[in-house]
Image (cartoon, grey):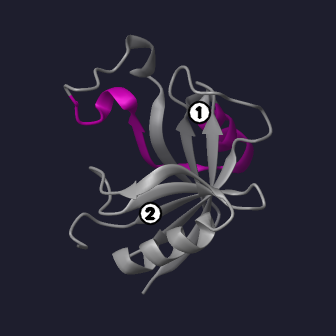
Amino acid sequence: MALRLTPYLMMDGNAKEAIDFYQQALGAEVLFQQTFGEMPENSEYPLPEEAKERLSHAMVKIGESELMFSDIFPGQPFQAGNQVTICISTDDKEKTKQIYEALQQGGQVNMPLQETFFSPAYGIVTDKFGVTFQIYTEGKEQQ
């Protein structure tokens, strides 16, 4: 079973600018980048025009490390200084569930653990110490 922790930066509409900056300052290499507008459409939740160009997810490599980015969705609260979360990735759905359940004890569920178009199990929890974790199972084929 693989288990990896990656810093995840939540930006307020300027994730592309931050990535450009880190490319220049740190030699970051973009591994993946997708806007909300490039995600599969959901007719029940039409995408507002102001969200389409914001990044839904990006990953860069800096040296031997990876860093993830996303813009918050328009209208979500944003407070500078609180935009760093930790993404815990595993290749085992049961391990994801175990980590999710453990971290929510005394904490707060921000997004229930659920299947998404990009993961068989994904959820967001702020633990009892105020640290926010995105718990992610790699690969749709892992059921």
Residue 32 shown in magenta = yes
Give the CA distance from mark 2 to mark 1.
Answer: 21 Å
Q: Is residue 92 visible to the viewer in this orientation of the structure?
A: no
- Amino acid at the residue labelled 1: Ala
Which x, y percent locates residue 64?
62, 69
Of 123 and 4, nearer the camera is 123
Q: Provide the residue designation for mark 1.
A: 15
- Amino acid at the residue labelled 2: Tyr
Which x, y percent locates residue 94?
38, 79
The residue positioned 65% from the left and 52% from the top of the image is 85
Q: Secondary structure at mark 1?
A: helix
Total labels: the figure holds 2
Q: Which mark is residue 136?
A: 2
The quarter of the picture where the C terminus appears is bottom left
Residue 26 shown in magenta = yes
The residue stretch that appears in magenta: 18-42
Q: Secondary structure at mark 2?
A: strand
Which x, y percent locates residue 140?
24, 63
Q: In screen coordinates, is 7 left or right of 52?
A: right
The residue positioned 74% from the left and 62% from the top of the image is 128
Residue 47 to residue 42: above or below:
above
Q: Residues within 10 Å of mark 2 (few under 14, many from 20)?
A: many
Q: In screen coordinates, is 45 left or right of 36?
A: left
Give the residue at the far front of this rendering.
106
Residue 15 to residue 121: above or below:
above
The residue positioned 29% from the left and 63% from the top of the image is 120
